[in-house]
Amino acid sequence: MRGWRGVATGRFAPSPTGRLHLGNLRTALVAWLFARHACSRFVLRVEDLDPATSRPEHEAAQLADLAAIGLDWDGPVVRQSTRRAAHDEAVAALEHAGRTYPCFCTRREIQAATRAPHGPDGSYPGTCRHLSDAERRDRLREGRRPAVRLRADGAVVTVVDRIHGPCSLVVDDVVLRRNDGVCAYNLAVVVDDAHQRVEEVVRGDDLLESTPRQVHLARLLGLTPPGHAHVPLVLAPDGARLAKRHGAVTLADRAARGEDPLAVRSVLAASLGLCPAGERPSLEELLGTFDPERLPRSPWVWTDEPSRPAQG
Ligand code: GLU
């Protein structure tokens, strides 16, 4: 449609595990505005790595919902399930560089062990980090199949987020490939953002904590990490992260209540301070008022009153 010439290629990367809800759609809208406001490309990636939870019908519904609120994207949609060879190659490169180790722990064993000193909550306690070759062979003989973990060596990485500012975290020994052979999100996201030449990652701020480890992985793989903007989440009135159980939260639910997709988009835009509540601005008008510096810094508390969104 337009001649994209910017240098901040953006993306939206949903997991096709269900319908997008208002929080997902709001993040998609912000990601699109970031890219298009900078006259940049905007690409889509379907994060369907996990065959147990991903469904083609959810992907189709998600893409239709994005289009229904007027969002467009450049080039073909990339499915992560088609990118396994590249993910495996990245794991092999890290293995070759001595940056990984096999981990034989079960989830239960990890929960039972105390958490890693100085590591983030829930981080791996390091049980398999220093196994000898003989100990590894024993576990393989027992029929245990290892996952591959990053040997992070307690690296501390600082990321300067466009919305949250500087964020420093200790990188934990995250799983890169599960023991069923499925590559982990943190590895795949880094490899695929680089493949799609993504320069600015705009996503929900529940993923802010994952960002230092992704930046660390990108650097280990010799890739240039993208910039980041983590958008505050949408919360339900009970303070929990918005989810399906909170009521009519998808476009289909809203349509059943007589609210068309552009009315939903207007509610989302108003929640971002881009228009007064009740107005129905076009995307061109939203691009005119969008200012990344003036995005809300706190969550939006959604109440089921389409014309009067509550500001959190
Ligand atoms: N696929 C992830 C999700 O739907 C988002 C990953 C990302 O944006 O980095 O939550």
Image (tube, rainbow, N blue to C red):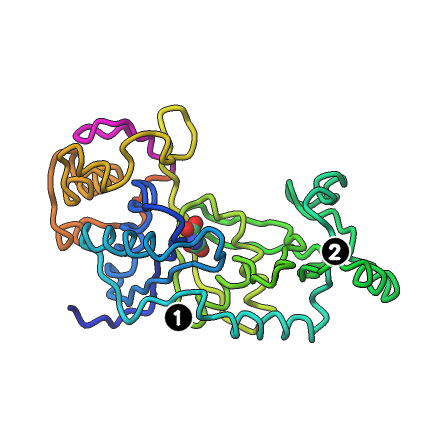
Q: What percent of the width, then of the height, locates residue 22?
A: 29, 40
Query: Does the beta carbon of the residue at mark 1 sit less than 8 Å from ligand 1?
Result: no
Whether residue 211 is visible to the viewer of this picture, yes or no, is: yes
Q: What percent of the width, then of the height, locates residue 249?
A: 29, 36
**What is the quadrant of the N terminus in the image?**
bottom left
* Point 14% across, 41% down: residue: 260
Mark 1 Cα-neighbour bin, 10 Å: few <14, some 14–19, many ≥20: some
* Point 20% across, 44% down: residue: 265
Mark 2 Cα-neighbour bin, 10 Å: few <14, some 14–19, many ≥20: some
Q: What percent of the width, then of the height, locates residue 245?
A: 37, 31
Check disc 1 and report its element: helix, strand or loop: loop
**What is the quadrant of the C terminus in the image?**
top left
Whether residue 299 is visible to the viewer of this picture, yes or no, is: no
* Point 31% across, 44% down: residue: 295
Give amino acid for label 2: Phe
Give amino acid for label 1: Gln
Residue 301 is one of the magenta-drawn residues: yes
Quarter-wise, where is residue 144 in the image?
bottom right
**Residue projecting furthest to the right:** 134
Residue under label 1:
196
Residue under label 2:
104
Check disc 2 and report its element: helix, strand or loop: loop
On the picture, is 111 further left or further right than 139?
left
Residue 59 is one of the magenta-drawn residues: no
